[in-house]
Amino acid sequence: AQKITQTQPGMFVQEKEAVTLDCTYDTSDPSYGLFWYKQPSSGEMIFLIYQGSYDQQNATEGRYSLNFQKARKSANLVISASQLGDSAMYFCAMRDYNAGNMLTFGGGTRLMVKP
Amino acid sequence: DAGVTQSPTHLIKTRGQQVTLRCSPKSGHDTVSWYQQALGQGPQFIFQYYEEEERQRGNFPDRFSGHQFPNYSSELNVNALLLGDSALYLCASSLVVNLSGYTFGSGTRLTVV
């Protein structure tokens, strides 16, 4: 069975500093994809970054990077140079291809950026 | 290029009633998935539609049903509403051939009283 764990229910970061949001996953399928989404108070899930299980390099998208440690089954999101607009809920999700097309989400981390 | 559009944005229903939520996928997408997000939790997969058929279903009772139309838009129907059905309902569209490209809408906030 798939499982995504986000152990940080809430985090504070100072504006302009970097922050790491933790995500661990559990799957027996060698082929899977890992996603990070941002959910502001408006409710929309905004795609941030994707990492495939066979990708050799860590994914990066602007200020977002994914620290993928396959042996440890972790996929931490790193946000560099935090901005006030980064304050939101962040969700880690996995698509396990044996399980079809569904995404399994973690419980989320609330990030609060302090000015 | 319009993203995923969901309607209505908010809805209040009484226990036992039925509700229909609507989703228009992103232009060019052919697959629609529905998720339920209870307050303070991550979204949970309800089901996915492709080629007007339910292709995959999560652990939800038969009270939850759906439909996909020829233009790829979709409806989520919930019968015999329970207080526990109160949640944010998210629609996500994708291309069946693109395994990493999901686009979510802003959701419908359903409150059951």
Image (tube, rainbow, N blue to C red):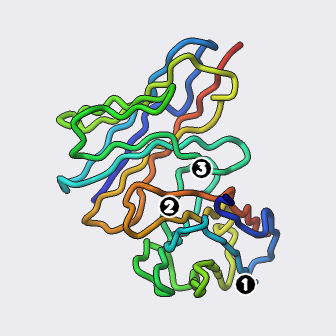
Q: Are marks 3 and 2 on the same chain?
A: no
Q: Is residue A6 left or right of residue B8?
A: left
Amino acid, disc 2: Gln
Circle 2 SS class? strand
Marks 3/2 in contact by CB < 8 Å: the verdict is: no
Q: Are marks 1 and 3 on the same chain?
A: no
Circle 1 SS class? loop
Mark 2 burial class by Cα count in 10 Å: few <14, some 14-19, many 20+? many
Amino acid, disc 1: Gln
Residue A50 in percent (x, y) is at 40, 44
Q: Which residue position holds label 3?
A: A45
What label sits on residue A24 in the rendered view? none
Q: Quarter of the image holding residue B9?
A: bottom right
Circle 3 SS class? loop
Q: What residue is rendered at 43% in x and 72% in y?
A: B58
Q: Quarter of the image holding residue B37?
A: bottom right
Position above or below: B1 against B84? above
Residue placed most toward the observer, B56 or B41: B56
Mark 1 burial class by Cα count in 10 Å: few <14, some 14-19, many 20+? some
What label sits on residue B18 in the rendered view? 1
Position above or below: B54 against B91? below
Give the distance between the C-alpha atoms of the residues marked 1 and 2, in whole angstroms.
Answer: 20 Å
In front: label 1 or label 3? 3
Residue A42 in percent (x, y) is at 73, 47
Q: Which residue position holds label 2?
A: B44
Dot 2: chain letter: B
Q: Quarter of the image holding residue B25?
A: bottom right
